[in-house]
Amino acid sequence: MKTFILTNINKLILLFFTLIVLFFASSFTVDESAKKMVDESFKQAIIVFGSAKALNGVISLAQGTEINLPFIVVAIGQILDPINDLVEQFSLIMLASLVSLGIQKILLNFVTNEIFNYILFTFIIIFNIWLFKRFRNDGKLRSIFFKTTFILIFLRFSIPMISYVNDFTYNYFVKPQYNIEHLNENILKVTDNVSKINQDTIEQKQDESSFFGKIVEKFDLKFYEKKVDEYKNAVDNSSEYIIDLIIVFIFQTILLPIVFIYILYVLIKKMFYNS
């Protein structure tokens, strides 16, 4: 018995490893937690995307706000052009993040599906039989089969692991400085402030008391300066909030999946092309 163990120590380690794989692959608690994390991230991304589109809408409305000064019409909302450009770029990034999270959900459903698990179980059973039982001229086929089995194992656990890595890195490293909920609340406040200024400007233009008062007001540049200051104050720090959100979502939904794809590429390349 001792001689058998010493002779087949590597095979026994692989056997033990695959038994652990079978145990965890059968544990759906891990899978459900991963799915819940991805769903929460997806919902959070939709909320932030909606906030970005709402901010884009009120800024676009502000850009159309005009004040009739003597001999000239001033589009007062044009001072918001840089912010609006940033918001539009942010909306595209959020759309890419939603697509990335949607793909993660599909892949997660794929590797946790019963069919995938049955295939993985079948491969592992054959793998363990093939460890101890050799056949004539089976070297190349055996090597390909073993490598394919390890690729399936990698996919089975690495895709759910992305969710755990995302959740861990966000809560312990990212959230203290880049809290998505707080940043989104700040974006909503900016949206409300710009919307109120838009409404006040429209009401002021409609409720001017008299023709004489209207003429006097329009010749007073303080009215124009006041509106410019109101818009500037309303969007104050909004660029910082948006950039912080861009950093978070690029890191969570784009950078980490790219790292996963790169690891998978290196693994396949080393297994099948460097053998």
Image (spheres, rainbow, N blue to C red):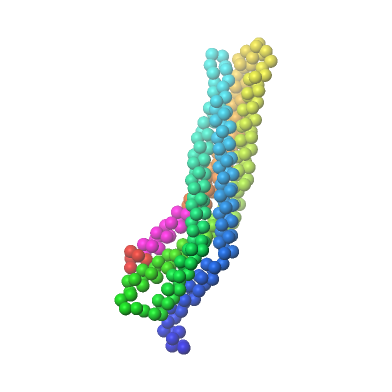
x 52%, y 54%: residue: 105
Above or below, 134 against 232 in this view is: below
**Image position, residue 138 (x, y; %):** 33, 75
Q: Is residue 16 above or below residue 153?
A: below
The answer, for residue 19, to whether it is visible in the render is yes
In screen coordinates, is 144 left or right of 99? left
Q: Nearer the viewer, residue 62 or 101?
A: 101
Does 161 appear in magenta? no
Residue beneath the point at 56% across and 61% down = 31
| Horizontal and vertical percent position of residue 260 | 46, 57
Residue at point 34%, 71% (across, down): 141
Q: Main secondary structure of the magenta part?
A: helix
Name the residue at the top extreme. 212
Residue 127 in the image: above or below residue 116: below
Per the image, is 265 magenta?
yes
Residues 269 and 19: in front is 19
The stretch of residues the image draws in magenta is 257-270
Residue 56 image position (x, y, % from top left): 55, 35
Asked whether, in this view, residue 93 is left or right of residue 265, the answer is right
